[in-house]
Image (cartoon, rainbow, N blue to C red):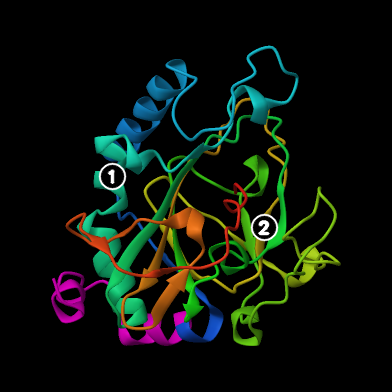
């Protein structure tokens, strides 16, 4: 499937939206997944969680006071779960991203993030600090499985910061490694309100983060997928191999640094 074929499958990305994506570093595609599909995602990942411990997830600690230890992020489920692989390679996601970046997306990562009520936020960071895609960058497709806003720990972005390249430190202390130091003032960031089924696409160098989920009852679940463009990527950090195309075929990219997986969001 060529870039032109992928792009032709989505008429929802206008020329103005693509220009805004290139300028601001992000784009929200509204209602890409209908309610029945986000309901299915929610039910599926909770069913997987009940089967813990499972491959490539953080250890579940049912008795912990930390909601993110009771429901830790689930890493790379597409490597062992058929439905996760189908969502990662969903034609609507690939076509929208292809139209935005004018390149064929290759899949590098899937991650399901539960973010229950009371869960902490994520410090501001840049995703390509972890993926180390070179000479281009990575791109995220952040699928809202629940409505996401400031009340339940929604995302904030700093528009235009992708133009400056990576500014994350090469190393930091164990707690903030990979985060922007110092953290940007939230007042200069833009809140990205999303409804379940919306997908936020953003550049790997865009500075972004989230606040704590202060809700007493609202979860803020998300399925996060990362891609690279075939034409402008020669290598990516070793953790993210194998890289696959829309048909699940392994793509031959060099394995760069053995970086750990990126943070949850």
Q: Position of residue 112 (x, y in %)?
A: 47, 40
Q: Of callouts 1 and 2, which one flags the residue occurring earlier in the amino acid sequence?
A: 1
Q: CA distance from mark 1 to mark 2?
A: 26 Å
Is-magenta flag for residue 48?
Answer: no
Above or below residue 190? Residue 69 is above
Write down the residue under mark 1.
85
Q: Residues within 10 Å of mark 1 (few under 14, many from 20)?
A: some
The residue beneath circle 2 is 209
Of residues 123 and 79, which is closer to you in this image? Answer: 79
Q: Which residues are magenta?
A: 1-21
Q: Residue at x 81, y 49 (%)?
A: 174
Placement of the N terminus among the 4 image quadrants: bottom left
Image spot of residue 46 (x, y percent): 43, 24
Q: Nearer the viewer, mark 1 or mark 2?
A: 1
The crowd level at tag 2 (other Cα within 10 Å; few <14, some 14-19, many 20+) is many
Magenta span contains residue 12: yes
179 lies left or right of 16: right
Report the side of 258 relative to 243 (left or right). right
Q: Position of residue 206 (x, y in %)?
A: 60, 72
- Identify the residue at horizontal 49%, vertical 78% (top origin): 134
| Residue 120, quarter of picture | top right
Residue in front for this viewpoint, 78 or 224: 78
């Amino acid at each position: 499937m060529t870039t032109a074929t992928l792009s032709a499958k989505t008429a929802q990305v206008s020329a103005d939206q693509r220009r805004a994506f290139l300028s601001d570093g992000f784009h929200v595609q509204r209602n890409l997944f209908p309610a029945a599909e986000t309901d299915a995602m929610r039910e599926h990942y909770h069913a997987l969680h009940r089967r813990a411990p499972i491959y490539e997830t953080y250890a579940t600690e049912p008795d912990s006071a930390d909601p993110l230890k009771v429901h830790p992020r689930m890493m790379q489920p597409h490597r062992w779960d058929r439905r996760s692989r189908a969502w990662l390679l969903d034609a609507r996601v690939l076509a929208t991203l292809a139209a935005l970046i004018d390149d064929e997306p290759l899949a590098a990562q899937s991650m399901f993030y539960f973010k229950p009520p009371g869960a902490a936020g994520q410090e501001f960071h840049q995703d390509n600090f972890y993926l180390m895609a070179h000479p281009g960058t990575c791109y995220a497709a952040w699928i809202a499985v629940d409505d996401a806003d400031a009340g339940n720990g929604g995302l904030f972005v700093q528009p235009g910061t992708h133009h400056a390249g990576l500014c994350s430190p090469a190393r930091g202390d164990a707690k903030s490694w990979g985060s922007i130091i110092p953290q940007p003032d939230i007042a200069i960031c833009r809140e990205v309100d999303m409804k379940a089924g919306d997908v936020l696409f953003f550049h790997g160098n865009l500075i972004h983060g989230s606040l704590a989920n202060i809700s007493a009852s609202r979860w803020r679940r998300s399925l996060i997928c990362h891609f690279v463009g075939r034409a402008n990527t020669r290598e990516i950090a070793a953790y993210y191999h194998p890289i696959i195309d829309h048909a699940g075929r392994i793509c031959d990219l060099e394995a760069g640094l053995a970086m750990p997986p990126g943070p949850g969001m």
